[in-house]
Amino acid sequence: MQLTAPLDMHLHLRDGDMLQNIAKASAQTFSGAIIMPNLVPPVSTKEEVIAYKERILAAIGDEKFTPYMTLFFKPSYDKAFLESLRDEITAIKLYPAGITTNSEGGVSGFDVEELRPTLEAMSELNIPLCVHGETNGFVMDREAEFVSIYERLANAFPKLKIIMEHITTKESVKALDKHENLYATITIHHLLLTLDDVAGGMLQPHLFCKPIAKRPEDREALLKVALEAHPKVMFGSDSAPHPKHAKENCGCAAGVFTAPIALQLLTELFEKHHALNNIQAFVSGNAQKIYGITPRTKTIILEKKPFTVPAIYNDVVPMYANETIAYSIKDIQHG
Ligand code: NCD
Ligand code: ZN
């Protein structure tokens, strides 16, 4: 079993010691990843994008990996500013204000006219808009409620590529086919979990993330489009590490750390559903087409050999810590 040039289209690499700790987990096994900008403060100037990219490249050392950089959306960005950093970024990430980790500087209210200058400039410059699509409503309804905002944006800016990040509901899946310019990323944890796994028994802090895992029928809808490698969906891990003390705490930080096991879990899942023919499109081909990128060559050889997930990566507890998964990485070839 092999995967060619896997891409992670939604990844948190953090900064400082955390970046040093976790960057290689992604850089070894992926050809590239879309890097989220929710640092403190968020990445929102050309200088910050360039400096963050340099810190990432320093942290990954000799690994062959492309960080596709993003900027934290602000409605004040004008066309001249965006033109000046067009070559430095692959997308811009929009967060509703305060909806998730480090998103306080995001957008409040989704007034199309207020957003128009920036979104029109992005559309003209062909910069995709990645969106964390949740309202501040009841937690299980937040994403479904946001679909009408996605639709409003999709209609108002028909040439703007809008990526619904880490979708978790059947409503978002439905929206994909209704609007030509809507796309989506899907994580591995949302293909595997429902709310029951997070909170149905003893509370599992390491499975807690935003958006929270939903109902079985939501997971079924996600599985269907992932396993058929629907051309508008792509893999984005949303691997979002937090130190153990921030997760195993009263007031648990949101985010699941999956980077070191993402490809092994995807392979196991696609095999279980007899869909291995489609995994390559889901982990690379679709993203290449949607974003118009050509990743560096890298081949990941996986074998069906049990792998016990480490208990901890320095101070980050991964998903399925201490559990045994079916696939292991056997070899990684470059060139
Ligand atoms: C992410 C993080 O920790 O940065 N957390 C999460 O639960 N997914 C932010 C995000 O993508 O929402
Ligand atoms: Zn994220």
Image (spheres, helix red, strand yellow):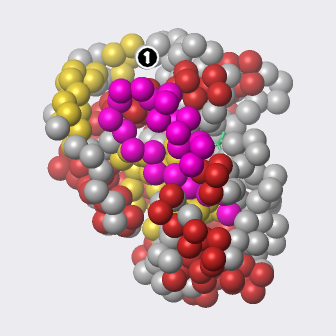
Query: Residue at left 64%, top 52%?
Result: 47
Please state the horizontal and vertical placement of residue 236, each as a whole percent of the image. Answer: 46, 48
Please state the horizontal and vertical placement of residue 335, each as a whole percent of the image. Answer: 17, 38
In the image: residue 82, left or right of residue 95: left
Where residue 246 sits, quadrant-wise, is: top right
In the image: residue 144, left or right of residue 138: left
Q: Nearer the viewer, residue 196 or 160?
A: 160
Secondary structure under badge 1? loop
Q: Can residue 236 be seen in this view?
A: no
Q: Is residue 333 above or below residue 307?
A: below
Q: Nearer the viewer, residue 294 or 303?
A: 294
The three-letter amino acid code for the residue at tag 1 is Val
Is residue 233 one of those drawn in magenta? Answer: no
In the image: residue 120, left or right of residue 189: right
Asked if disc 1 is less than 8 Å from ligand 1, the answer is no
Which quarter of the image is occupied by the N terminus? Answer: top left
Query: Residue at left 36%, top 22%?
Result: 325
Where residue 21 sits, quadrant-wise, is: top right
Query: Residue at left 49%, top 23%?
Result: 320
Q: Is residue 70 visible?
A: yes
Report crowding for label 1: few under 14, some 14 to 19, many 20 or more residues within 10 A (C-alpha).
Answer: some
Please state the horizontal and vertical placement of residue 123, each as a whole percent of the image. Answer: 53, 80
Where residue 231 sits, quadrant-wise, is: bottom left
Location of mark 1 (residue): 309
Please state the horizontal and vertical placement of residue 260, each as a whole percent of the image. Answer: 43, 27
Please state the extent of the stretch shown in magenta in the rendering. 50-73
Q: Report how many numbered discs are placed on residues in the image.
A: 1
Q: Nearer the viewer, residue 24 or 155?
A: 24
Q: Nearer the viewer, residue 123 or 182?
A: 123
